[in-house]
Image (cartoon, rainbow, N blue to C red):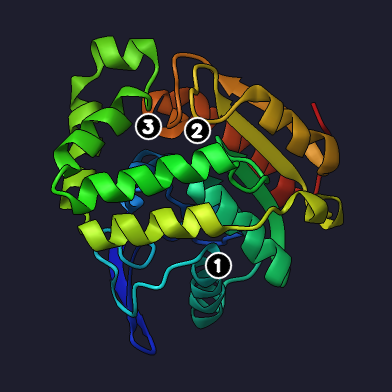
Amino acid sequence: MIEEKQLEIDDLQIYYKIKKAGKAELTVVFIHGFPFDSSIWDKQLEALPDNVCGISYDIRGFGKSRGGHHFFSIDLFASDLIRFLEKLSVQRIVLCGVSMGGYIALRAAQRSSDHLAGLILCDTNASADSNEAKLKRFESIEEITGGGKAQFTEGFLKGLFSKKTNQENRQLIDQIGHIISETHDDSICAAQLALASRTETVSFLPAISVPCLIIRGAEDQMMSLEQAEQMDSQLNSHGILEIADAGHLPNAENPEAFNEAINHFLQKISKGSDDRS
């Protein structure tokens, strides 16, 4: 059973969902990307093995998490995550982040490796934004503040999904579009600035000793295979797994294949196996 809860940390109120396990050997924490919320992980929570506890939460400014200021940064998001997990007294943690969630997971691992047992990095990378990418983010801020949020959302959705999703899963596209439309303009713009200003974590990758799984939608237009290979070459990696019929959100576009991959990885960690098969 999945429970919905809220937790207050100073002036920040964090909304989260938790799937408890009777004898939890691991807790996997799902971190959503930009500009989504924790609901994109519902099918992962439902499918977790009985010995794994699952938590998904809304990053400040997104979904139902409220309070705090709007001077966002990836470091701030990572600090929020660390404090959140400390408050919950979570042990043996696997961080699973998609896109921006991957940036947050890597930064949180850099700042505190306490209780970290593994990383799942989905459609993300360890590099800072290029100048071109930064300029695109600044243009989107101008578009939104100029009253063009609908146009921003339409353009964002166009590059998000695989061909199959665009042709056959209008429900998912509408769901993601609704999440974006419900997200406050200030949060979207503040997060764009946070993404543009983030620093690289490439130089930190060799220091990560825990097992890592890198997942990529085979048709992802936002993150390249080369970016995934860069992380794979420097991490204690179980390899790159490409999910068929998926773009930037493989967990939502092909949840069956995604769930099979992460559950296999989680079971190997829970048993203490370092088998790469």
Amino acid found under the numbered disc labelled 1: Ala
Q: Residue at x 31, y 50 (%)?
A: 141
Amino acid found under the numbered disc labelled 3: Ala
Task: Using the image, tell me which numbered label, if any, was put on residue 13.
Answer: none
Q: Position of residue 134 (x, y in %)?
A: 50, 46
Query: Which circle, 2 or 1, is nearer the viewer?
Result: 1
Please tell me whether mark 1 sits on a helix, a strand or a loop.
Answer: helix
Q: Earlier in the sequence, mark 3 or mark 1?
A: 1
Amino acid found under the numbered disc labelled 2: Asn
Q: Earlier in the sequence, mark 3 or mark 2?
A: 3
Q: Is residue 203 left or right of residue 13?
A: right
Q: Quadrant of the N terminus?
A: bottom left
Q: Nearest the camera: 200 or 112?
A: 200
Q: Nearest the camera: 2 or 195?
A: 195
Q: Is residue 2 above or below residue 234?
A: below
Q: Quadrant of residue 213?
A: top right
Question: CA gap, disc 2 to disc 1?
Answer: 25 Å
Q: Earlier in the sequence, mark 2 or mark 1?
A: 1
Work out whether residue 52 can be spotted: yes
Question: CA gap, disc 3 to disc 1?
Answer: 23 Å
Give yes or no for contact between labels 3 and 2 (Cβ–Cβ under 8 Å). no
Task: Using the image, tell me which numbered label, if any, was put on residue 252.
Answer: 3
Q: Is residue 21 above or below residue 46?
A: below
Q: Give the residue pinned by disc 2.
A: 259
Q: Give the residue pinned by disc 1.
A: 78
